[in-house]
Image (cartoon, rainbow, N blue to C red):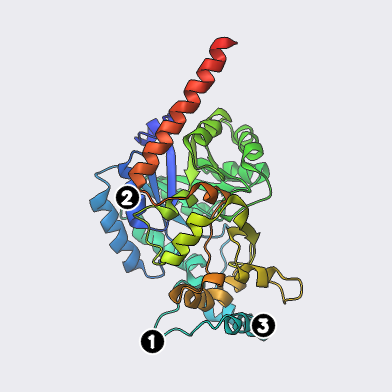
Amino acid sequence: MQTELSTTLGVEHAVFGFTPFPAVAAAITRAGGFGVLGAVRYTAPDDLARDLDWMQQHTEGLPYGLDVVMPAKKVEGVSESDVEAMIPEGHRRYAAEILAKHHVPPLAAGEASGWRITGWMEEVARNQLDVAFDYPIALLANALGSPPPDVIARAHDHGVRVAALAGSPRHARHHKAAGIDIVVAQGYEAGGHTGEIATMVLTPEVVAAVDPLPVLAAGGIGTGEQIAAGLALGAQGVWLGSLWLTTEEAELHSRRLTAKLLAAGPGDTVRSRALTGKPARQLRTEWTDAWDDPSGPGTLPMPLQGLLVAEANSRIQRHEVEPLLGTPVGQIVGRMNSERSVQAVFDDLTRGFERAIDRINRIAGRA
């Protein structure tokens, strides 16, 4: 599964694996792919440095990257407390009512509420970059589109390629104009924040829009045959995220959540604003249903919704309240029906890719 891009980056397979778990990212790289560690949950620079140190020790000198979340436009002087003060009291009551209905216990005294809005704030992302550029990362990806121009320039000064996700050809053209090196065409089927266009339609549109920049196909890809389809559409690689959630190296810390993922089908996800305020594909739960219910107050815009629900999500996960328990995941969840090592996933991807290429070669030979 080699392309011009994978050869340039020095990886065996043109498979870019996004994950919040260092052990998964390192295993992807060791398996011949390109592991990309998600940084949004690191609110303390020392924690990110610790895990990048670990990545260095477990990637055997092979390339890996980092994914941050930061807006293209700088917002000055806005603190977390400023954002929190904007949350209406009615929305706080509604969240509390959902938790009470399902008898969700509070966190223990002194127990941190886990991930909050800080991971989405530009100041935090810039602190993450101060750490990241001390390491030999080969790629910086931004989940909110093109990062600010000075960040792109700083990455290039360090010899680091920059990637950005796009949900439409218009977004992709903006990335090209901003100086992005790689565009990730993320289709409607993907987990997390997505646009309205399906991967099969989006990928060739983005390839044409940003030529000659390399494009990675993302969304609804979890087999070698689907990788072959993405490359046939003009992509130079694929960007996979959901597929790694049920690997043995993943650190979900919830057997019930893992069981829900393994049992879910492609129709058990929903694009909801319940998590962050922007449409994000995730497991459908009674929590997403409550926030999408027209009789409720509705969700708040990003970043207010993410801050509003942070403690609630921590309580749901800590106590594994099954009706409310969910996670961002794409429609490929229907193929995630067993726990396997990252290497076993790669072996399966390789076999599927070879089957697809053999099939196409047989068809072409009969033409």
Rounded to the nearest angstrom, the CA distance separating label 2 from label 3 is 42 Å
- Under mark 3, the amino acid is Pro
Residue 26: give its label.
2
Kindly indicate the quadrant of the structure image that contains residue 192.
bottom right
- Left or right of 331: which side holds 134? left
Depth check, mark 3 against mark 1: the one in front is: 1
Q: Is residue 235 visible?
A: no
Query: Which residue is label 3 attached to?
Result: 88
Q: Residue furthest bottom?
A: 109
- Left or right of 280: which side holds 294? right
Q: Residue furthest front?
A: 263
Q: Secondary structure at mark 3?
A: loop
- Under mark 1, the amino acid is Gly
Residue 110: give its label.
1
Judge the density around disc 1: few (<14), some (14-19), many (≥20) Cα neighbours within 10 Å: few
Residue 186: give its label.
none
**Of pointers 2 and 1, the one earlier in the residue sequence:** 2
Kindly indicate the quadrant of the structure image that contains residue 232.
top right
Rounded to the nearest angstrom, the CA distance separating label 3 from label 1 is 26 Å
Q: Are marks 2 and 3 in contact (CB under 8 Å)?
A: no
